[in-house]
Amino acid sequence: MTELLLGIDVGTSSTKGVLTDLQGTLLKTHVVEHGVSHPQPGWAEQDADEVWWKDVVQVCRNLLDGSPYTGENVVGMAVSAIGPCLLPLDAQGNPLRPGILYGVDTRATEEIRELNALLGEDAIYSFSKMHFTSQAIGPKIKWLRKHEPEIWSRTAKLTTASSYLVFKLTSRHVMDRHTASHYMPLMDGETLEWSGRYAGHFCDLSMLPELGWSDEIAGSVTPEAARITGLREGTPVTVGAVDALSEALSVGVAEPGDLMVMYGSTTFFILVQDTPTPDPRVWTVGGAFKGQLNLAAGMATTGALTGWFREQLAGGSSFSTLFHEATFVPPGSAGLLVLPYFSGERTPINDPRASGIFAGLNLSHTRAHLFRATLEGVAFGIRHNLETFRDLGADINRVVAVGGGAQSRMWPQIVSDVCNMEQVLPEVTVGASYGNAFLAGLASGHLNMTDLKAWSRPREVLKPGAHNHQIYSELYPHFLALYQQNRGLMHELHRFHTKSRNQALNNDV
């Protein structure tokens, strides 16, 4: 019997599954598209059963339909998903509301202010190695208790997307330590274990899943899950991971000094460290493997911004058309500058009330100028994050570009030019699902870490262009100033928008 590994990743806009052999050869893939619900400005939600679990079942059914493989071939599987999310479950494990998504959901801004005043910003940072941001789950738990008390009264468990899927497959509540780090301040940043120090302000620790590392087995596929998915009963399932962590592993980002830049719906950064360098602007979190730490960061809109541009400003034109048009625009987009903060911003400014700006517009600009400037705006945001890493003394030895945005050579080349850095483009760029297949083999004992080099061969190394870098370096200070000089105005416009929205809602009632 052919021994295969199954990896599934539930991303922000799609779910992808892969079947590989033990050598990492891609044998079969399947993708299911889905959306994000925005019931109010600043909110981002997905239904746990109708999106996350339904997608996983559909992917399994497609990959294991007997042409030519079945669940009998699978010797290990791993699932990753967007994170950190907040999903309340009742005593039977049923979701009580849609999952509240990661840092792109900014509903708990007021709770963050309240908790900082109550508990002290310095005390929280000292304990958790991070400040409260929209990525943190503690304030969202506080929001749930305050605004949805009926749901809270029925809540028995709190979990995240990947952990919910592991629960559906194995009946075990387990969470990886990378994701759990963002359930601050419920995790001790030193020990990477749950702590009751601040639990009284949030929830009983019994409501949280067990903790594990991403290369450990969480449990095995139950008879009910086997019936629904087509998997073999007893198939080992790993603890799981946040999607970015699996994506990093998929391209060999596993050694200290390795940095992944993920061009997805958002941009996510994972720098593997052996010695932590905590800083309030970014996140210090658990890694994939026992004893490993990551320095992580994330922007709020990347692929989500180019998707918005395509739908709202380009009449649904294909990305290939937009990228092609942008090749004829010179670096710097004829003095057009974009702040890519269209859903607030995460690191390093951590400002949920930030907003997007197109600056320098004139009648000579075309949509090609606007699109290239959008790509460059994201690149400036990436530079801001990488300079923050270097400011705090973090060593970056190798940068690997992954994600859908890296499929077009143009965008990562702009980033290399802006940041004056080389980027490795991997030979296999399937994404987190491929990293999950490797994790499944590692956890089940069919692979070891020495196999990762063969799974993650490089295709090309992008080198920065000196001329373009000089142009971008002239613009970069203006990018930083554009936010600093307009921050107060952004916040006033955010306040006005919130007020107008609330008035409209009251009028509807």
Image (cartoon, rainbow, N blue to C red):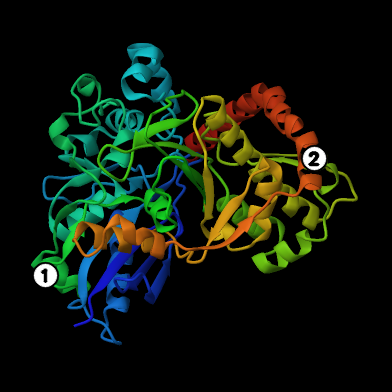
Quarter of the picture containing the N terminus is: bottom left
Q: Are the residues flagged by discs 1 and 2 in contact, CB closer than 8 Å? A: no
Tell me the amino acid under the disc marked 2.
Gln
Disc 2: which residue: 470
Cα distance between the residues tagged 1 and 2? 59 Å
Vertical placement of 464 versus 296: above or below? below
Q: Where on the picture, by quarter, is residue 159?
A: top left
Badge 1 local density, few (<14 within 10 Å), some, or many (20+)? some
Question: Can residue 53 be seen from the camera position used here?
Answer: yes
Badge 2 local density, few (<14 within 10 Å), some, or many (20+)? few
Disc 1: which residue: 233
- Where residue 284 appears, x then y in whole percent? 39, 31
**Mark 1 or mark 2, earlier in chain:** 1
Tell me the amino acid under the disc marked 1.
Glu
Q: Say which residue appears at 64% left-offset and 59% top-offset.
A: 311
Residue lying farthest to the bottom in this orientation: 67
- Where residue 359 appears, x then y in whole percent? 78, 38
In this view, the residue in front, 455 or 300, is: 455
Label 2: state its secondary structure.
Answer: helix
In this view, the residue in front, 141 or 292, is: 292
Q: Which mark is residue 437?
A: none
